């Protein structure tokens, strides 16, 4: 990662299966600045490395039909 890149942690609600995980991973990966995306169904969270704005990540998840909010890990 570059010096201005960070990891954004999101609490994600509404995921019930691996299909949901794939959908959330896909939409987060498409956000400008997202480098690496890891979505954990059991923990109900997503971790996104890169320079993507947290508001853009939350908006992408919500547009896909799930709820999300950033949190400090």
Image (spheres, grey):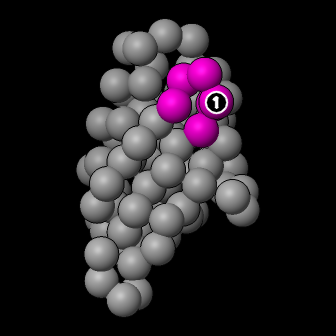
Disc 1 is placed on an element classified as loop
Residue behind mark 1: 43
Q: Quadrant of the N terminus?
A: bottom left
Q: Quadrant of residue 70?
A: bottom right
Membership of 6 in magenta stretch:
no
Prevailing secondary structure class for the magenta stretch in the rendered image = loop
**Figure label count:** 1
Where residue 63 sits: x, y (%)? 49, 38
Q: Over which residues does the magenta segment extend?
A: 40-45
Residue 46 or residue 68, whichever sits in front: 46
In the displayed structure, would residue 2 be above or below residue 9?
A: below
Visible in this render: residue 15? yes
Where residue 73 sits: x, y (%)? 69, 58
In the displayed structure, would residue 5 be above or below residue 31?
A: below
Q: Residue furthest bottom?
A: 3
Residue at left 43%, top 24%? Answer: 21
Where residue 11 sits: x, y (%)? 66, 42
């Amino acid at each position: 990662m570059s010096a201005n890149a960070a990891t954004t942690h999101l609490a994600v609600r509404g995921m019930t299966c691996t299909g949901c995980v794939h959908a959330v991973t896909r939409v987060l990966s498409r956000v400008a600045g997202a480098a690496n995306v890891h979505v954990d169904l059991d923990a109900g969270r997503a971790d996104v490395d890169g320079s993507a704005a947290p508001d853009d990540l939350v908006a992408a998840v919500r547009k896909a039909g799930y709820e999300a909010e950033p949190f400090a890990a």
